[in-house]
Image (tube, rainbow, N blue to C red):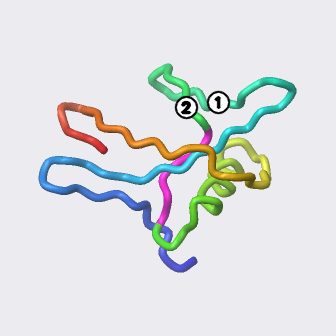
Amino acid sequence: MTDMTDIRTQFKQTLFDIRACGILVNENKLLVSHEADGSQTLTGGAVKISETTEQTVKREFLEETGLDVSIGSLTAIIENFFTLNNQPYQ
């Protein structure tokens, strides 16, 4: 990959980005990431230009957990609309 820029942009006042994450279950336990604000998320992060969803999930798991994971099937697509720091976000 030559361009490792996150897919993030702004349209008028709305921020937009694409995130991919993975579901890892081991011994009936779900792996979650604990964020600085106290929230929990599935392990993952921003998709980069020219990167597939599978590549994103593998890279993020390696960066965040040190695990070299294999990817199964797509489980869900989730679209979120919310406000962050008084700015619309999708």
x, y percentage for residue 51?
A: 55, 68
**Quadrant position of the C terminus in the picture:** top left
Location of residue 82 (image quadrant)? top left
x, y percentage for residue 81?
A: 30, 37
Location of residue 42 (image quadrant)? top right
Residue at 64%, 63% (x, y): give it: 55
Q: Tags 2 and 1 in contact by the CB under 8 Å rule?
A: yes
User: Which residue corresponds to mark 2?
Assistant: 41
Earlier residue among tags 2 and 1: 1
The reply to whether the magenta stretch includes residue 47 is yes
The reply to whether the magenta stretch includes residue 28 is no
Secondary element at tag 1: loop
x, y percentage for residue 17?
A: 37, 52
In this rendering, the answer to whether 88 lies above or below 9 is: above
Residue type pointed to by label 1: Val
* Relative to 84, 25 lies left or right: right
Q: Residues within 10 Å of mark 2 (few under 14, many from 20)?
A: few
Magenta residues, start to end: 43-48
**Quadrant position of the N terminus in the picture:** bottom right
User: Which residue corresponds to mark 1?
Assistant: 32
